[in-house]
Amino acid sequence: MGEFRILLVIAIAILVVYVCYRIAEKKGFIPWFWLFTGGLGIILLLILPSANSQGLSEEVMKKRTGIANVIGICITVILVGGIFFLKSTSDK
């Protein structure tokens, strides 16, 4: 039963990573910045306005892309850093 749970968690993690990547790509953001943001990233990506909307000026598109990419990087750094921090403190 334990092996099944591990496989299920891995499958869900891969699905979440894929969904984050695809939403970010569709909205005109850099998908690699959003890969490890998890469920929080999916929620934020759905809330953030698209940088690919028709009728937007170049300036607005760049601003939306820049803000979204910084958010993605920050969430990734916080989550991945938090995981490593928790792992390092649990080893002691």
Image: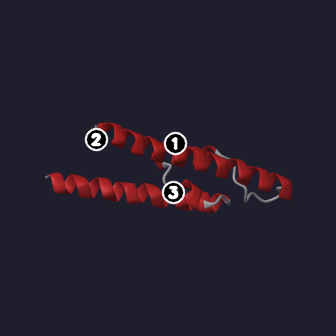
The kind of residue tagged 2 is Asp
Residue, disc 3 = 35
Rendered residue at 30%/38% (across/down): 90
Rendered residue at 24%/54% (across/down): 6
SS class, disc 3: loop
- Which quadrant of the structure image shows residue 51? bottom right
Q: Nearer the viewer, mark 3 or mark 1?
A: 1
Residue 52 visible within the image: yes
Give the percent coordinates (x, y) of residue 5: 22, 52
Rendered residue at 25%/58% (across/down): 7
SS class, disc 2: loop
Mark 1 Cα within 10 Å, few/some/many (few <14, many 20+)?
A: few
Cα separation, mark 2 vs mark 3, equals 27 Å
Mark 3 Cα within 10 Å, few/some/many (few <14, many 20+)?
A: many
The mark that comes first in sequence, 3 or 1, is: 3
Residue 73, placed above or below residue 11: above
Rendered residue at 16%/52% (across/down): 2
Residue, disc 1 = 78
The kind of residue tagged 3 is Leu
Q: Which mark is residue 91?
A: 2
SS class, disc 1: helix
The mark that comes first in sequence, 1 or 2, is: 1
Residue situated in front as seen by the camera: 81 or 52? 81
The kind of residue tagged 1 is Ile
Give the percent coordinates (x, y) of residue 80: 46, 47
Residue 73 lies left or right of residue 51; in this view the side is left
Asked if the residue at tag 2 contacts the one at tag 1, i.e. Cβ–Cβ closer than 8 Å, the answer is: no
User: Considering the image in quadrants, where does the C terminus appear?
Assistant: top left
